[in-house]
Amino acid sequence: MAEVYVAGAAMTPFGKADGTVSDLAGAAVRGALSDAGVEPAEVQQVFFGNSASGLLQGQEMIRGQVYLAETGLLGAAIVNVENACAASSSAFSLACAAVGSGQADVALAVGAEKLVVPQKVRAFAALASATDLERRPEMRELVWDLALGGSPEPTMPSSSPLMVHYAEKGAAYLERSGGTVEDLARVVVKSRHAGSLSPYAQFRTPVTIDEVLAGRLIHPPLHMAMCSPLSDGAAALVVMSADAARRRGRANLRVRATAIASNNPLSGVTPTQAASTAAYERAGLGPADLDVVEVHDAAAPAELLLIEELGLTPPGTAIKLLRDGETALGGSIPVNTGGGLLSRGHPIGATGAAQIVEIADQLRGRAGPRQVTGARIGLAQNGGGVFFDDEATVTITILERVDAAGISA
C-alpha cells in the first residue's frame, strides 16, 4: 500500500441538532473539504458511514447519495458503510484503502447520525438492534416491539440494553481489579473536564465525583453520567495520496495504519486486542510510541478495559493510571482529550470519524486549550455493536505527524 495522508478534517458540534442528517453531513463535508483545499468535483470516492437512519428516519440503502445530494459530490463513487458504532471509522479505513491501492488520489470518509428523535424509545430500539438478534430472542422481541410495529404503544425501557451489558462488564472489572464505583466517577470527571475545553462537546460543564454518584442509577454500578448520551452530529475526513498531498502542501499527517477485526470468541483475544496488534505491526509501532489516544468509552468502564486491551498498561492497572492522572490532559498518555463519547456525545454513525478528527487536530497542534504538547503519534479505537459478549467489530487507526520530507516530526 502506498502512503496515505489526512488532508482535511472537520466535525459539527455534537448534541441535539435542529437540522436534518443532510444538514449535519453537509456541514462536516464542507468543513473537511475547505480544510483540505479541495473542491467537491475533485473527490473521486466517498465512503458514507451511518447506522440508524433506517430505523429512525426510514432511509435505507442509498443514505450517502441522499444525505450528500447538496454537497456537490454526486457523480463520485459513493459507498454506504453500516458497521454499528464503527461505521465511519470503517468508512475511513476504506477511504485509505482506496487511496493506498491507487484507485483514487482523493477520497472522503463521512459519518453522520441523528439519534435525537421525538420518540426516544425508537432510538433505544436502534441501539438494541446492534446486538445478535438471531441468538438473543429477547433482544429481537425488544426491537420488534419498540421499532417495527410489534407494539402499538411501546414502553420505554428503564435503560439501554447496551448499558446493561457495559454495567455487567464494569462490575466484573471492578471486582477483579480492586476498583470502586468512585473510579468510574473519576473517568467521568476527567471526561467532563476535557469536554469543557472542546467547542464540539455535548457536555461542557465540569463535574465532581459526588455529583456523578448523585445521578440516577441506571444499572449497578453505572450512574447516568457514566453512560454516553444520545446525540446528533457528523464528522468528515479527506484522505489523499502522497503526490496529491504534497502538491497541495497537505503532506503533514500520515496514516500509519488502519485495522478492523470482528469478534471471534474462539480466538482467545478481544477484537480490540486483535485489531490493535494488526495495526501496531503494520505501523511498526507499539503502545509506548503513542502520545494521545481515543477509545470508545460508550460507558465509563469501557475506557479502563480498553486502555488495557490496547497494551497501554498491564491488566488490572488502568485504575492506577487513572488515579495518578496519567490518562488526563497533562498526563503521560492522555486518553479521550475531546471528552470521549461520555462528554463529546455519541451519534453512533459519526463517532468513529469524530475520534479521528480529534487525533488529527491534536497532531496538527490545533486542539486549543486541550492540546497535548508535542503530540506526534495518535491512535483511535472505535468499537461497534455487541456480539458474544464483546464488541462486534473494532477499528484501529494510527496517525503520525511528519515534516515536509516525510520524517516523523
Image (cartoon, rainbow, N blue to C red):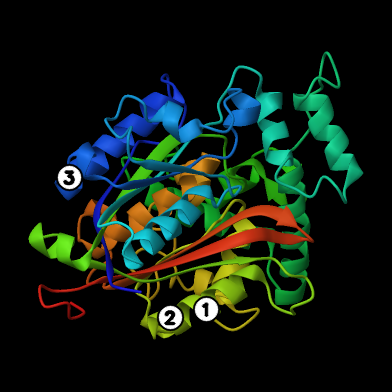
Where does label 3 land, which residue?
38
- Nearer the observer, 182 or 91: 91
Percent x, y for residue 25? 38, 33
Q: Amino acid at mark 1?
A: Ala
Q: Earlier in the sequence, mark 1 or mark 3?
A: 3
Label 2 near label 1: C-beta < 8 Å?
yes
Q: Residue furthest top?
A: 152
Secondary element under disc 1, as helix, strand or loop, is helix
Residue displayed at 45% across by 35% down: 64
Q: Is residue 339 above or below residue 277?
A: above
- Residue 133 appears left or right of 181: right
Where does label 2 land, which residue?
282
Percent x, y for residue 333? 40, 73
* Alpha carbons under labels 1 and 3: distance apart: 32 Å
Label 3 near label 2: C-beta < 8 Å?
no
Percent x, y for residue 216? 69, 37
Q: What is the quadrant of residue 363 in the picture?
A: bottom left
Q: Earlier in the sequence, mark 2 or mark 3?
A: 3
- Residue 286 appears left or right of 278: left
Q: Amino acid at mark 2?
A: Arg
Where does label 1 land, which residue?
278
- Nearer the observer, 236 or 217: 236
Q: Is residue 400 visible?
A: yes
* Alpha carbons under labels 1 and 2: distance apart: 6 Å
Q: Residue furthest right?
A: 137
Quarter of the image where the N terminus is located: bottom left
Q: Amino acid at mark 3?
A: Val
Q: Is residue 207 visible?
A: no
Residue displayed at 75% across by 48% down: 131
Please rate how many residues cluster around mark 3, counting C-alpha atoms within 10 Å: few if below 14, some from 14 to 19, many from 20: some
Quarter of the image where the C terminus is located: bottom left
Q: Nearer the viewer, mark 1 or mark 3?
A: 3
